[in-house]
Image (spheres, rainbow, N blue to C red):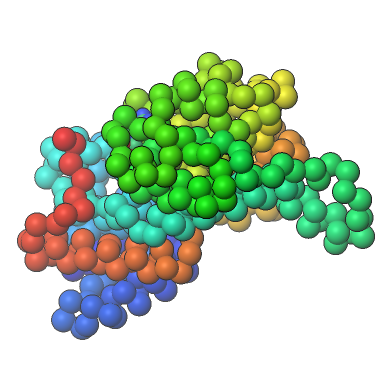
Amino acid sequence: MKTAVFSARPYDRHFLEAANQQGGTADAFTFEYFDVGLDLATATLAQDCQAVCVFVNDRLDAPVLRALHALGVRAVLLRCAGFNNVDIAAAEQLGLFVARVPAYSPEAVAEHALALIMTLNRHTHRAYNRVREGNFMLDGLLGRTLHGRTVGIVGTGKIGLATARIMKGMGCTVLGFDPYRSPAFAEIGEAVALDELLTRSDIVSLHCPLTPDTHHLINEESLGRMKPGAMLVNTSRGGLVNTDAVVRALKSRHLGHLAIDVYEQESALFFQDLSGEIIDDDLFQRLMTFPNVLVTGHQGFFTVEALQEICSITLGNLSDFANGVECTNTVTAA
Ligand code: NAI
């Protein structure tokens, strides 16, 4: 069975091929790698393939799914947890098999959230450059001791829980908001309403999925509820945050710090080397001018352990599809 792998970087090829070898030759699949993302213009690359393997910024709306189906594609393998980029209802209508990797080292993303918090809080991103230039002044590098601070976790699922555990270990008071109560979280922190979390937290960290309900969950109103000087961290999905409103909150000095690993318009920027290009996204460029903003390019998942798990689970999903076996990782509209 041949699978077209879109948005394929060298590390995707390396870890997918390693997982493919581990399965033994009897189960080995054939992969064709394309570094371009999947959209209507590139869908034809999946000619002669029965499956496509895609990532977070590949577009799988109804027209793309119909084009893939017409080419003979019958399975969509997401090498990520979120599936907000797939029109699941359209996929179901076409009878496509869609599977994701629901959990792979949630600690990888939680640890990245911690890295962002620590960097921004102690200004190590600025200290690094300063010291390399022989400037050993401390002015402007004043941080806050995290021990004793209050951290609000929005979405206490796998990654939120891992983040809560880390922050508890740092000596923070942990608050959580999730429409579904988590007994595991109750052992670590206090479950509260979203408004209470926003008003009480020094650091708000987002770990809920992007859905129509959570789109722009952080907007002018919710930012207004946050403590003056608080930090907002988003390692989940860019669409959770209204970036225009965030820029206004930063300019008014109400929002103290912003750390993001995801950005609503990231598909035009992330996972590419644009260092020699002119970047047209004025909103993103405005974010880059704030000393209290830290942006990474969707690398929360990017550890050896997480990539090994992603690829081995993706291979398992493909194997289930190929063998007509029920797959526990399928995504359905229900
Ligand atoms: P999960 O499904 O284990 O947890 C998500 C939690 O959010 C659930 O407990 C759910 O009840 C809760 N939730 C749903 N609607 C909510 C709302 N309106 N308000 C608050 N909570 C709500 O998912 P997991 O594995 O923890 O992943 C969370 C998100 O992290 C994913 O949806 C994905 O977008 C993002 N992610 C980012 C990565 C990165 O590299 N930066 C890598 C992997 C995931």
Res 204 → quadrant: top right
Residue 276's x, y, as percent? 69, 53
Quadrant for ligand 1? top left
Asked if one can make out residue 269 in the rendered structure from this viewpoint, the answer is: no
Horizontal side, residue 327 vs residue 296: left or right = left
Residue 224 screen position, x and y as percent: 58, 18
90 up-or-down from 223: above or below: below
Q: Position of residue 16 (x, y in %)?
A: 35, 70
Q: Give percent across and percent down for residue 96.
A: 16, 48
Q: Residue at x 61, y 38 (%)?
A: 149
Rendering quarter of residue 148: top right
Number of marks = 0
Say which residue appears at 22% left-offset and 39% top-offset. Answer: 88
Left or right for 141, reference 29: right
Residue 92 is left or right of residue 179, and the answer is left
Which residue is outermost to the bottom?
A: 25
| Point 18% across, 41% down: residue | 332
In the image, residue 132 above or below residue 64: below
Asked whether, in this view, residue 188 is left or right of residue 254, the answer is left
**Quadrant occupied by the N terminus:** bottom left
Q: Nearer the viewer, residue 295 or 98?
A: 295
The quadrant of the rendering that contains the C terminus is top left
Q: Which residue is more in the foreground, 236 or 136?
A: 136
Q: Quadrant of residue 220?
A: top right
Q: Is residue 231 visible?
A: yes
Decide which of 101, 204 is in the foreground and name it. Answer: 204
| Above or below, 212 relative to 127 | above
